[in-house]
Image: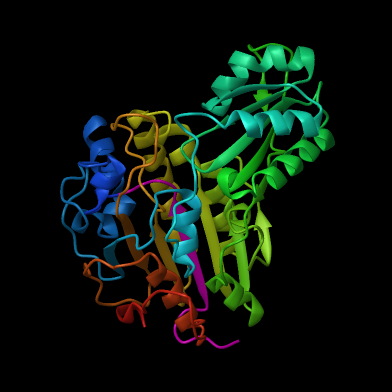
Amino acid sequence: MKYKKYKRVFMIVMDSLGIGAMKDASLFHDEGTNTFVHISERCNGLNIPTLNALGLHDLDSRILGTKKVDHPHSFVCKGIEASNGKDTMTGHWEMMGILTTEPFQTFTDTGFPKELIDELSKKTGRKIIGNCAASGTEIISKLGEEQTRDGSLIVYTSADSVLQIAANKASVPLDELYRCCSIARELCMKKEWLVGRVIARPYVGETKENFKRTSERHDYALSPSGKTYMNTLKENGYEVSCIGKINDIFNGEGVTKTQKTVSNDDGMVKTIEEAKRDFTGLCFVNLVEFDSEYGHRRNPIGYGKAIEDFDVRLKELLQNLKDDDLLIITADHGNDPTHRGTDHTREMVPMIFYSKSIEQGKCLEDRTSFADMGRTIIENFDLKPEEKQIGNVIRELM
């Protein structure tokens, strides 16, 4: 199959690891945020020799634990989001060529409207409890015993555009939970209730002391609003292997293979295994724990440890890459754990490009869209963008 320079591209999204407030951050009440820098400060420095060797210091010299180095095999720059928003789907969709001008609705501060909750209860035949923004583990601990007793549904949201439904498999069997989520997805197609994803969150256990979420989560997502660069790759016979929640974010569009993960480490293990396999195309990875476990929970120390753990696995991945592989490391938004509230933050993202074939790596100017990554990927495979797809080729990589 045709390619100009790279046979395989590995694109890893460090979910929410932003690197400084965008110029319009005040419109989102996110002035002064910097996820990477503030985590490093709270941790009194990060032990991240692999990221440091790739040139991370060039992106922000205030990241404690990094220093200026030569990085001949990597280009680095910051990415500025062109879309209007700071959520998971907006960021990922933009990477693959889609500009979002209207941000997805969130119900973080108010919970869902009474009319939606009443309609969901009527159509499912079940009582609804919760209806607030919460951590999934915390709300199960708080309401799980009630839900288990009466077979109700715990409905909650987060800083993302999501409606999540949690239920104990002992009182609401898995197929029934999925049925209820399908009903919620249909209801949430209405403009006034439109959310990006409805998520089934099954759990098991008898009491709050031993409740545990299972790996049978299922996402009911909106399909992308247009054709993505993943579609372009798939339609032309290239592999698009997805790890983590990528398949859910794109509702399966443009995906040829998908693997779920239970942790960041599991995601990196699966990525390393993909690097040992022969294919031509894209391996697209999301590491969600940075965001879900540490960003939203405002835990900078835990976040810092997760970055350090990632750095160890990253070294292992680099050892398994071939001369004609390209590795892209980036993020989809910020989630500064030192900022107020629990919401995402409107930030630029790191863009790190590594290949053994790069010989004159350096720091590049900021890119004006996340889509420049996706556009460069299809250019490498000698493919052309559709009329409405955004993004410019990063010529230094070609």
* Res 278 visible: no
Total labels: the figure holds 0
Q: Is residue 11 above or below residue 234?
A: above
The relative height of residue 268 versus residue 128 in the rendered view (above or below) is: below
Quarter of the figure with residue 315: bottom left
| Image location (x, y in percent) of residue 209 | 63, 11
Horizontal side of residue 115 vs 183, given as left or right: left
Residue range corresponding to the magenta coloring: 1-18
Instruction: Work out whether residue 21 or residue 38 is closer to the camera in this orientation and state it.
Output: 21
166 or 40: which is nearer to us? 166
Viewer-side residue, 369 vs 35: 369
> x, y percentage for residue 351?
33, 61
| Residue 292, image x, y percentages | 48, 36
- Measuring 29% from the left and 67% from the top, which residue is drawn there? 368
Residue pictured at 21% horizontal, 48% vertical: 66
What quarter of the picture does the C terminus occupy? bottom left
Whether 223 is drawn above or below 299: the answer is below
| Quarter in which the N terminus is drawn | bottom right
Q: Residue at x 39, y 31 (%)?
A: 342
Left or right? Give the position of 102 relative to 392: right
Q: Name which quarter of the figure residue 120 lies in.
A: top right
Residue 150 is one of the magenta-drawn residues: no
